[in-house]
Amino acid sequence: MAFLAGHCMCGAVAWTYSGQLTRNLVCHCADCQRATSAPFTAFLGMRPEHLTWTGDIVHYESSPNTFRGFCPSCGSRLYFRSDKWPTEIHVHAATMTDPDDYRPDAQVVMRSRAKWLDRLPSIPTHDGFQQKPSVHTPAETL
Ligand SMILES: [Zn+2]
Ligand SMILES: [Zn+2]
């Protein structure tokens, strides 16, 4: 049994959940990459009957009977649900009030995982935003 809460970037949409989690997974599929404008996304699988939303949500039907919800004010992605899995809704873990509480236990659709993720451990890191842009040619970025 978990009690979790979350919200979109602007706060117009919020959710609370009190129930068993069905999944904690990182998805590398091409649809999630495109839908979230990110190299991968992370979900919490929840039972719809234990999930409560406040605020208006708009959804996009990304494939037949598959819906991706988002906040119409700030555009934050909120959930994925599909008639293929009618007993669960996948809420984006990044919307959790405290995203550090997230504990994924699987990665899926590894065949479309962004190849450049392999390079992350070997490239420079900065605690804040990089101060000056580096000057390089596109060939050097490969
Ligand atoms: Zn919002
Ligand atoms: Zn996906």
Image (tube, rainbow, N blue to C red):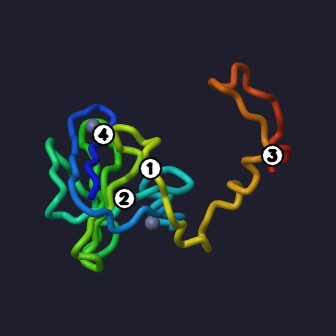
List x then y, in percent, for residue 28.
Answer: 54, 64
Amino acid type indicated by mark 2? Leu
Residue 87 found in image quarter: bottom left
Which residue position is annotated with label 3? 122
List x then y, in percent, for residue 6.
Answer: 29, 42
Tell which circle, 4 or 1, labels the residue nearer the N-terminal end. 4
Q: Are marks 2 and 3 in contact (CB under 8 Å)?
A: no
> Could you tell me how far apart the alpha carbons at marks 3 and 1 are, in whole angstroms?
25 Å
Which residue position is annotated with label 2? 44
Amino acid type indicated by mark 1? Tyr
Q: Residues within 10 Å of mark 1 (few under 14, many from 20)?
A: some
List x then y, in percent, for residue 46.
Answer: 27, 62
> Could you tell me how far apart the alpha carbons at marks 2 and 3 are, in whole angstroms?
29 Å
Amino acid type indicated by mark 3? Ser
x 28%, y 49%: residue: 70
Q: Residues within 10 Å of mark 2 (few under 14, many from 20)?
A: many
Which residue position is annotated with label 1? 102
x 21%, y 35%: residue: 12
Taking the image as shown, residue 104 lies to the left or right of residue 133, namely left
Question: Of residues 139 and 25, which is closer to you in this image?
Answer: 25
Q: Are marks 2 and 1 in contact (CB under 8 Å)?
A: yes
Q: Residue furthest bottom?
A: 84
Report helix, strand or loop for mark 1: loop
Report helix, strand or loop for mark 4: loop
Point out the image quarter for the N terminus.
bottom left
